[in-house]
Amino acid sequence: MLLCLHGTCVAFDGRALLLVGPSGSGKSSLALQLMAFGADLVSDDQTQLMRDGDGVVATAPSAISGLIEAREVGLLRANVCEKATLCAIVKMDAIEGARLPRKRYMDILSVAVPVLHKSEGPHFAAALLQYLKGGALDPDDHP
């Protein structure tokens, strides 16, 4: 089964983040920041998701592969990760209020995928890249 979602997806070392939210919520801008830190583009604006064993794989529709929109600049070419395993979803229309947020999940193709809310701090893109590199601990499981 193939699921197509309105969202922008970037990856680092085969691990993907799917950025979701309404138009103008900053999905492409955050993706560009992550790409400046070394992530590769999977897909901008529309992302295809497929179940792969115990996980979900993200890819781009062929018509938009390798392109990302930068508002007030235009459509830009980008280094592409053709497919990556989804490790988290970032909801751009929800602001995180907790210093150490509890884990949240969203069901995507019968897989529980961690959900993060947007942070307004200047560290957010760097923190997300580190999340891609090493994941995160659940504060409920550790003192």
Image (spheres, grey):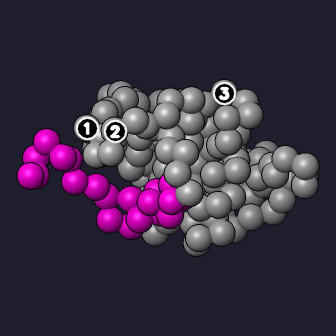
Secondary structure at badge 2 equals: loop
- Using the image, determine if residue 122 lies above or below residue 60: below
Residue 75 in percent (x, y) is at: 87, 53
Q: Is residue 31 left or right of residue 112?
A: right
As drawn, 143 above or below 118: below
Front tag of 2 and 3: 2
Sequence order check: which comes first, mark 2 or mark 3?
Answer: 3
Label at residue 98: 2
Q: Residue at x 77, y 52 (%)?
A: 68
Measuring from the top left, give residue 2's x and y in whole percent.
Answer: 53, 32
Which amino acid type is marked by label 2? Answer: Ala
Q: What amino acid type should be assigned to the residue bearing mark 3?
A: Pro
Tell me if label 1 and label 2 are in contact, CB under 8 Å: yes
Identify the magenta region. Answer: 123-143
Q: How many neighbours does mark 3 have within 10 angstroms: few (below 14), some (14-19), or many (20 or more)?
A: few
Residue at image mark 3: 22
Q: Nearer the viewer, residue 136 or 41?
A: 136
Task: Determine which residue is flagged by label 1.
Answer: 102
**Front residue of this view, candidates 79 and 131:** 131
Marks 1 and 2, how far apart at CA = 8 Å
Residue 94 is at least partly visible in this image: yes
Q: Secondary structure at mark 3?
A: loop
Q: Nearer the viewer, mark 1 or mark 2?
A: 2
Under circle 1, the secondary element is loop
Disc on res. 118? none
The residue depicted at 50 percent of the width and 44 percent of the height is 119
